[in-house]
Image: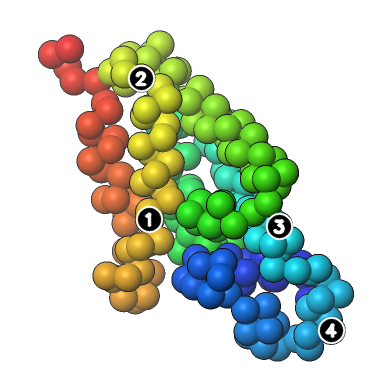
Amino acid sequence: MKREAFYRVGSIYFNQKGFKGTSLDEIASSLDVTKGAFYYHIKNKEELLYQCFNRTLDVENLLLNKAGLVQATGLKKMELSLRYLFNVQFSEEGPLIRYRALPSLDEEHRKDILKATKANNKILGTYIAEGFEDGTLRKIDVDIAQNVLSGAVEASPELAEWMTDSEISSSGPELSATYFHLFINGLARRSNN
């Protein structure tokens, strides 16, 4: 079994049950592996959480950079970034770990994660700044905008609490368009500005 499976399933449990409520034995059982096999790969719960964060940051970085490869406006790159990050939450690659679990990491790991998070946020901020330059976004505070948008991505898995799995799957990519409509239209430059 690949470590990726441990991190993906770990993310599911940490997101649903929190750090204290998550049991490594329960995760091992859900993966149908022995405790010995599980503990061979994962030292302890804090280490699993740290690796779940690293996996999330790697996926985020990949998707943010994928959006940047598109020859498009800053607004379009920002929108693609958000939609990629949203859609991965509901794909077989998801979910991404929720940042509310961050305080459960030890100080050294927390600093590492915050540093990498800042680097990913900077990529999104670059697309927002490009939108200012190309005129597709209104000039607003980049830091506030990227934090609001990151918060929207962070909250997106909560859709599963009020939508059925079939509603989410049948909506496909349109769900992410609908979800971010308010944010995109709230940031887009208006013709009379």
Q: CA distance from mark 2 to mark 3?
A: 32 Å
Q: Earlier in the sequence, mark 1 or mark 2?
A: 2
Q: Which mark is residue 36?
A: 4
Report which residue position mark 3 lands on: 51
Q: Earlier in the sequence, mark 1 or mark 3?
A: 3
Q: CA distance from mark 1 to mark 3?
A: 21 Å
Report which residue position mark 1 lands on: 156
Amino acid carrying label 2: it is: Asp
Tag 2: Cα neighbours inside 10 Å, few (<14), some, or many (≥20)? Answer: few
Residue 173 position within the rendered picture, expressed as x and y whole percent measured from the top left = 38, 55
Q: CA distance from mark 1 to mark 4?
A: 35 Å
Are dots 1 and 3 in contact, CB under 8 Å? no
Amino acid carrying label 4: it is: Gly
Residue 190 position within the rendered picture, expressed as x and y whole percent measured from the top left = 18, 20
Q: CA distance from mark 1 to mark 2?
A: 23 Å
Q: Earlier in the sequence, mark 1 or mark 4?
A: 4
Q: Residue at x 31, y 18 (%)?
A: 140
Helix, strand or loop at label 1? It is helix
Q: Nearer the viewer, residue 50 or 166?
A: 50
Amino acid carrying label 1: it is: Ser
Q: Which mark is residue 141?
A: 2
Are dots 1 and 2 in contact, CB under 8 Å? no
The quadrant where residue 116 appears: top right
Q: CA distance from mark 2 to mark 4?
A: 50 Å
Tag 1: Cα neighbours inside 10 Å, few (<14), some, or many (≥20)? Answer: some
